[in-house]
Amino acid sequence: MKSNAVPTVILGGTGYVAGELLRLVAGHPQLQLCAAVSESQAGEAIKSVFPHLQNAFATQAYIGRDELDKTLVKLAGQHVALFSAAPHGASAAMIESVLQSADKAGCTLTVVDASADFRFDNNAAYEAVYGHPHGAQALLDQFTSALPEHRSMAAGSADKPHVGQPGCFATSMLLGAVPLLQSGISDGVIHAFGITGSTGSGRSPIATTHHPLRHSNLYAYKPLSHRHAPEVVSICEMLTGNELDLRFIPHSGPFARGIHMTLQAELVKDVDAAFVTRLLREFYANQPFIDVLDGMPRIKDVAGSNFAHIGVAVEGSALAIFVAIDNLLKGAAGSCVQWMNIKLGLDETTGLLAPGPGWI
């Protein structure tokens, strides 16, 4: 047992994001996994689902939702960290149920949700994107949705107990779009061209992640209609007070993990690349996971880590901002742990400073 460890629960514990959450919790000095919840794998050893974690959890097995209630009773009087990696549309109701069980058991939860269920602050906005009512509308005002790096701009975030982490594509866009919108140097229109690895499509095999199709291939999907676009627009307006006109075209890349995002905008002020680079460096000066480069970011330099690299190019009135992140870490599990560190009063870098492998 880790010293002074916070008991930790992971819901929906068998997907790629859940696997990364499990790996990060295993290496975290102050989080201790007490339950990984999966109805489909209840009773199965964690290492049978994620063989690469074979040394992390010994014989620890997944439990079902009913068993979690018994676990929460044993944690009465304690503060529990809850990560949800459950599917979009299902996570909200699951979280609401667990919060109710925790209240009955006498323990307190801090929730960080990796799904899309708490990325909008009202049911109408959520339903407009996902086509069905929100699963736990009474909880919406208890969640902040923003990147950890933008928390000081999110009004009331310190008073809200829980977090809905923005999506992976959204993370890469927000890192460039938020400081750009706040600065007022562009016209508010951003064209975004993003390429993601196959892990961004989830663990269940589908046609677009089938290896013969994905290998040595590149193609657009859901052009100008991806669900992360309204999420980015909403968060940008909430943080900066400025409207964003976003035209986003996502692409599937022939690699497993990582996102490379290019944001293009029209400058309304006479500035050069050096000015924009300084602007971004000042904006992220106190953010340990953001590195604004003199050159261009590359996925292999950040894959397997919680770091983000940003680059800039300017030609006349044309501005381009380039962002590279790991979709499963900075775009999901890594930022979730970063948020949990913040909410628990820990240094935000705790358990997240391991360098990436470099040749992933």
Image (tube, rainbow, N blue to C red):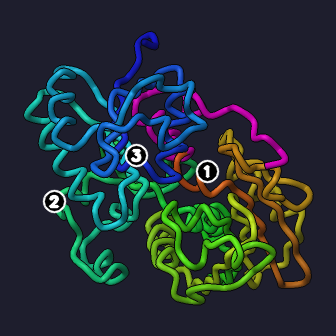
Residue 30 in the image, given as x and y percentages of width and height: 47, 21
Q: Which numbered disc, 3 or 1, marks the residue that appears first in the sequence?
A: 3
- Mark 1, residues whose alpha carbon is within 10 Å: few (<14), some, or many (≥20)? many
Q: Element type at marker 2? A: helix
Q: Which residue lies furthest to the left in this view?
A: 104
What distance separates the C-alpha of mark 1 from that of mark 2? 29 Å
User: Residue under circle 1?
Assistant: 330
| Residue 141 image point, x, y percent | 25, 57
Look at the numbered disc 3 and give the secondary structure of its residue: loop
Q: Look at 90% across and 84% down and name the residue there.
A: 316
Task: Name which quarter of the figure residue 271 lies in.
Answer: bottom right
Tell me the distance, in whole angstroms, between the alpha carbons under discs 3 and 1. 18 Å
- Is residue 111 depicted above or below 350 in this figure? below
Q: Cα distance, mark 3 to mark 2?
A: 25 Å
The mark closer to the camera, 3 or 1, is 3
Of 313 and 47, nearer the camera is 47
Q: Nearer the viewer, residue 281 or 299?
A: 299
The residue tagged 3 is: 13
Q: Which amino acid does label 3 sit on?
A: Gly
| Disc 3 crowd, CA 10 A, few/some/many (<14, 14-19, 20+) | many
Q: Give the range drawn in magenta.
A: 334-360
Q: In this view, does 186 lie above or below 29?
A: below
Q: In the rendering, at what x and y percent does residue 178 appear?
A: 60, 65
> Which is nearer the eye, 134 or 312?
134
Q: Is the magenta stretch mostly helix, strand or loop?
A: loop
Res 185 visible = no
Residue 72: give its label: none
Which SS class for mark 1?
Answer: helix
Image point (78%, 67%), residue name: 322
Where is mark 2, residue-wise?
A: 138
Q: Label 1 is placed on what type of residue? A: Lys
* Residue pictured at 62% horizontal, 73% vertical: 210
